[in-house]
Amino acid sequence: MPKFIAGIVMLFLSTAAYAEVGNGYVGEKECFACHKQVKVDYQIDRHGRVFTAAPGNDLQAKGCEACHGLGAAHREAVNKEEKDLKIENFKSGKGLPVEQNKRCLACHENAERGFWKGSVHEMSGVGCATCHKIHIEEKRPGMTVCFTCHSDKKAQIQKSSHMPMREGKVNCMGCHNPHGSFGPKMLKAPSINETCYACHAEKRGPFLWEHAVVRESCVNCHDPHGSNNPGLLKSKGPFLCTQCHQYGGHVNMPRYNRASAAYGKGCVNCHTRIHGSNHPSGAKFTR
Amino acid sequence: MAVLLSALPSWGDEKSGNIEKVAELKAGYQVVGDVDSAKFNEYRDIRDGAYLYRLGLSVFDKSSRRYFDFTGTRLFRDDQNALLSAGVDRKWRIELEWDETPHLFSNKARTPYDYQGGGLFTVSATAGVDMTTAGASTAKDTDVADYLAATLHDTALGTQREKARAAFHVNATQDLSFNIEASVERKEGFEVTGAAIGDRPPRAMNTQITEPVDYRTRELNFKTEYVKELYQVQLSYHLSSFENEVDSFTWENIFYNPTSGTFATVEDGGTDRAFSTIGRTSLYPDNIYQNVMLSGGINLPKDSRLNATVSYSLFDQNENLLPYSASSLGTDWDSLGKLPRASADASMDAVYLKADYSITPVGRLGLHAFYSYYGLDNETKTDEWYYATQDAADSGGGVNVNNQRKNLAYSYAKQNYGVDAYYPLRSVRLGGGYEREEVDRDFREADTGEDMLKASLSTRLAGAVSLSLKYLYGDRVANGYNGEVTDESYHFSNAVESGNDRPYGAFGNHPDLRKFDVADRKRSQFDISASAEPMSDLTVSASYSLRKDNYDSDVLSSQPLAGTGYASEAGTTPGDQLGLLKEERRFYSVDASYVPDERLRFGAFYSKEKLRSTQRGIAFDENKRVLATYDWNQAAKQWMATTDDKTDTVGLSVVYVIIPEKLSFKSDYTYSFGTVDIRYTGYGTGLPLDSNTYYYAFADPEKVSHTNHVVNATLEYQAMRNVVVGLSYVYDRYKIKDWMQEPSGGWVEEVDSEFLLRDSSEDTRWGNRLVTLGSLLGPSYEAHVGTVTVAYSF
């Protein structure tokens, strides 16, 4: 029985892989005759395993030619040593990834990738192959890929105050969708705050007493990618508050005459409910 | 479980060669040098002992395309993750995940408080100090220090997140898929907060204390997607329920002398006031969040695509409220009957709309037009609430009540729209764009509108060098700035309020202040990056970016109290903008990779980040605001602070295959050095801290610095075909210097220990003291970690 199943599978594989030979198609076997290293990598790559063993549609069944186009003309051009090799190698666009992206989207324009067109990355000239290896199964942490371009974020996560990114508990894709998004800044939620609430549900409120600047955007005060100030704050405690509060009482100086104003959490030592208060006397977020 | 089992590949098929199995086990023993700092294990769990670094099992049946995967990392530690997934490839998948994340704040914190559960903190004994004017202040300090020395004990300070998640995905047809996911997260532990009693400094007595964290977040996600070649539609629903098991916390006043009666009598600038024997505050309330979203995209002629999203979010919170005060002082302020309503009855909704259209209309010209709207509507009912300040008594012995406040329902609506374009011209890609952002706000100082212009260029020179430039210019204009808008919360009626606090005489803020998030702003952003391959084995890239925000809002001198009849009504403000004035960020980086041969790979990274912000403030006395001696008009009382925040980061790495497929070595080094240097000029600069005249005096604080060196080195030996033996060493050194975390500034001094701080420059009142959990809760450390591992795979 197992032999019978294996036979069926092998028959299926052989027909799937070479079903498209003819009509200008030459099939993977012909491609691999020259592109030997690609064959080695491709066979263990996800694309290779799917296209060869279990194509999901007619396009995938074309193997290499699903993306690179007809092989017969290419073979002929190579044999004649022509300058134009008559194959889509994605180099004709002077490094522009538009054509290559189109090939990828032919199968992958779904889920989060449905927002690729018009995304910040697309408009910046980023291509699928900028981040993904098409022929090689390469396991790199997602952040490593992002840091190739976003070197400022790579440095920021090394700062003293950071989210657990370098410890491997949070990564860029926790908040952002690099393929495009309906949200701002390629975020996965409709707003910055709704992104933050995914982990910080306690700060969601709504509260009886709202701190308007907090409600509008967490990044008014915090830099989520890392900071030299505790709590991912953008400035040292009392200086951050005095950027907006020049009240005539005690908050108009980084140091009032209180031990607590310049120590620990600064103003937040007393204004402990700074994200919003649910106490009937919490108008100033002191409880 | 039955579903999982059904996904298990048939082991009987192994002989046919249809079963692919991969298993990996990596375990070892770890030795950690003595590390006496919570910072080392801030988000991880590295300690002595046996360690199961990784456990993986992957089984795939090629014939049925069933699979089963299990991956466990750092198992049985506080930062473990275990993920099990099974299913039939491209048919269905089930996932079960368990994840833990610690967040350790300190392992050296000490407190006089004992946590009794349910949010109650008690002390075994009170200070028993005569806190009235009759006592000498230094004696009080000494007595409290002695009390702390006798009662302080270690306290845990950190939280632990534990999350369980289950998900099921099914492709019902080739076009239609469903995904459902449920999770429960528990977060427990203690964070740092303040436990203040008293209406305001210097009368408020404060104590750092641990805030109990006992959260449960339950979530449910449902998503369905219909995908055709030309169009795709997604519909999702998200429900998140947050519950805090501790709604409030209550603490005993450690300054309370039981022999003094039912309240504590404490000196207040020459007179005595009564303070409650306990303090109480509300904690984060339970809340429910729901979101439903419909999103779709359609491919149209001319290589174009239209995407559209509609999202609706609902936020609800209806926690029962505490009474105004925990104190029995006065009349019924500790009664719920005095509240205008018994529960928060808070609700908001957010509507998000987005549509964008991409097209290649002519040649290779790409266009992208977009519009988005985010409207947050706060529907929480507004009421009038007494402002009973911090459980302290007024001079008459009742609870100190400072008029009333209205809870304002902040709402805002933001619109963004614009168009981006790019055009490939020979080997150059040119880009440009325009965007406008408009934000309308309720109960904020200003609505804003911003125009943004964008330009970009990218090219590949001589095939080996890539160059990219980007520029953005933004001009944000605040449409009329009303600095008094917050008064709508503070004082609700001229008739009810009396004296100097009447609304028309109040400053919610100094009139020259502009809050930076709603102020005029001119923004410039410039980025340039280049990468090159000067040799086939060498890749070098470099980048520079500049961000400049100028918040100059053309502030003019004003006469805020004109027509009030107050003695200060003729006064005019200096007309110099207060608040954040400028921000600038420069970032430089160089990255190189050198691969001389297949066995050797080097990497290097260096970056420098320089942030500079400039802000202005003014020292003025609120109590003299309307008097003839007012000082809010004096430019001489202005101060400036320039903050330089710099970070240097270095990364080096090497991978060397010493003997191919037998012995390899890899190592990396990371260095991060961050400093925050504040230069303070203007009012009070250099004046003696102990001068009553200049009690606002301030001086340049000591430079803050964080230094972190981390070296990782691993030697791996392939002992057998399936066995790799590894030897690892980690050197991790962290050094911190921070005036906000250690009592080293001129404005604060220790009284016997780091647990009692005092500022004696102005007066002896108890608001100038702070009982702390200890300085530098996560102090410097130097750690060595050695590990022996064995990895077995088949």
Image (cartoon, grey):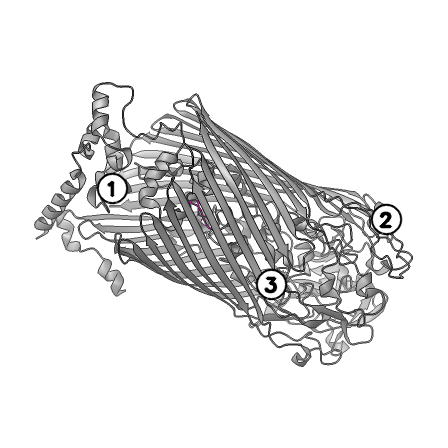
Q: Amino acid at mark 1?
A: Leu
Residue B479 image label: none
Q: For this view, does B180 lie left or right of residue A209?
A: left
Q: Amino acid at mark 2?
A: Gln
Marks 3 and 1 belong to one chain: no
Q: For this view, does B279 lie left or right of residue B154?
A: right
Residue at image position (23%, 50%) is: B60
Q: For this view, does A57 lie left or right of residue B737?
A: left
Label the magenta part by its dominant secondary structure.
loop
Which callout, 3 or 2, points to the residue nearer the camera? 2
- Would you say the residues marked 1 and 2 are in contact, meaning their CB atoms lie under 8 Å apart? no
Label 1 SS? loop
Dot 3, crowdedness within 10 Å: few (<14), some or many (≥20)? many
Q: In the image, which residues are magenta?
A: A176-182
Which quarter of the rendered picture does the C terminus of chain A lie within?
bottom right
Marks 3 and 2 belong to one chain: yes
The answer for which chain carries disc 2 is: B
Q: Which residue is mark 2?
A: B634
Pinpoint residue B540: horizontal percent, then vertical percent.
46, 27
Q: Which residue is mark 3?
A: B210
Dot 1, crowdedness within 10 Å: few (<14), some or many (≥20)? some
Q: Nearer the viewer, residue B310 or B646?
A: B310
Which callout, 1 or 2, points to the residue nearer the camera? 1
Q: Above or below — where is B266 with respect to B508?
A: below
Pinpoint residue A203: horizontal percent, then vertical percent.
56, 61
Pinpoint residue A195: horizontal percent, then vertical percent.
50, 54
Q: Which residue is mark 1?
A: A59
Residue B487 in the magenta stretch? The answer is no
